[in-house]
Image (tube, helix red, strand yellow):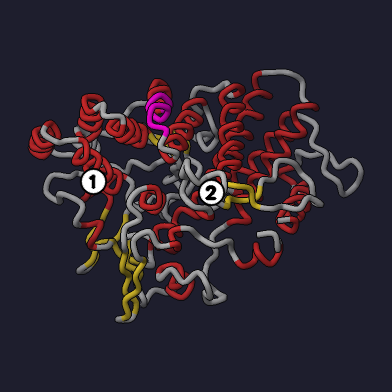
Amino acid sequence: MKNILKYAFFFVAAITTVGCDDYLDVQPIGRVIPETLTDYRSVLTRGYEAFPKHKSLTTLRGDEIILDQYSQDFAYFRDIYVWNDRNPDKITTSFQYDALYNTIFYANVIINDAAGKLEASADKDQLIGEAYALRAYSYFDLLNLFAKPYNTATAGTDKGVPLALKVDLEQAYTPESVAKVYEQILSDKEEAKRLLTKDTQTKGLNYRFSKAAIYALESRIFLYQKEWTKAVEAANKALTYKNTLVDLNATPVLTTSYDGVESILALEDVFSNNLKGAGYVSSDLLDAYDQTNDLRFGVYFQKLGGDYVFRKGGELAQKCSFRASELYLTKAEASSQLSDLTTARTTVLDFIKKRYKAAGFNQLSIEIDAMNQTELLAFIAQERQREFAAEGHRWFDLRRTTQKSIKHTVIDQDYTLIQNDPRYTLPFPQNARLNNPNL
């Protein structure tokens, strides 16, 4: 961890000499001292840029993709695909633990330094609010990669991740409990809510957090913590800012575009280009769709020979961290968990009306009306699988729910992730463990 922060510190120092990014004074020579709002905005922009593409890698571990053993990137992904975390090949792509802490470093610069230097203004509050939100989001993803899923009964003793809340190269970074890290996430989230001034961000700047985005993050946090009432409240609040869904009956376009009507936070690449070219859509995922009536099937996938490939990802325009669809499905799931089946049914029907042909929707309406709580929860889970294909949700959803058994085949050899397998939680990357023996 110390090496990661040291790298980040010197990277900040290095950017002062870039001509078109000449926004930091050098006082004294070789040291970076941001002074103005513009300076600090540029530092936080670096933090946003540093946020990694780790969600693509989680797709390899789930049930959405078949890795093509003949692809040129096969060797880089093979061990992730077969859950070989103990002794992976040295060329295996690593989950970007260090990149998430790099983002946290930049957020810390804003949180700890900008508050005391900048004069009071709405822009200052917005900037610092974004930094708190970005730090909360980074820790949330770190936990959901490298720690056990949240469990109220065990969170106090389950091993989490280190907390780095200030720029201190000498600090010993020891993992805190899952409960402790969630406390920090919730604290940062509250600070962001208090400070953020922009309801939404304009297109092109919507990689930045807004009020809509922080409430969307809040709804996701509470969903994962099984705080159902709070998840509904947060989703409802976010929906007051952003509730428009793409109607695939009228406009058959990908729903993940940064400039689409659903976009709330367009920070992440939903599916990296090299991974997109390294595999095919799994039969598990294809079979989840009503290929006649579900309009997403023809929009999300493309036939290539005898297989299907993903259309999502691989384009700069497809940046997506939060969008309106998630709010509907979070509200539906949490409402159903609360036995409020009327709200759950109404919400999920509002959503699927924009995803199915009229005949399919009419039939589903009848079926949904007859579903009990268990059946409705199963349907909502399937809608999440269908809606968020290749967006990084599936692995996290499996972790927090069934932790189902998954089988992958490579060169005629079967590999199995058994139900509730410990490998649903990633170990810290080897380079991180070498840099920090405390892990």
Image quarter where the N terminus lies is bottom right
- The answer to whether any part of residue 259 appears in the image is no
**Is 259 contained in the magenta span?**
no
What's the amino acid at mark 2?
Leu
Q: Up-down: is 109 above or below 30?
A: above
Q: Residue furthest top?
A: 121
Label 1, secondary structure: give it.
helix
Query: Could you tell me the amino acid type at mark 1?
Result: Arg
Vertical comparison of 156 with 129: above or below: below
- Residue of label 2: 143
Q: Is residue 13 left or right of residue 122?
A: right
Question: Which residue in the structure is indicated by mark 1?
Answer: 296
Residue drawn 14% across the image and 36% down it: 371
- State the image quarter where residue 368 is shown: top left
Figure quadrant of residue 190: top right
Say if residue 373 shows up in the picture: yes
Segment tinted magenta in the rendering: 227-234
**In the image, what residue occupies the spot 36% across and 52% down?**
398
Name the residue: 71% across, 43% down: 21
Residue at the outermost bottom position: 412
371 to 275, vertically: above or below? above
Residue 241 location (% of width, % of height) = 42, 22
Residue 274 at x, y = what percent?
Answer: 44, 63
Instruction: Name which residue lies at 63% across and 46% down.
Output: 103
337 with respect to 7 (left or right):
left
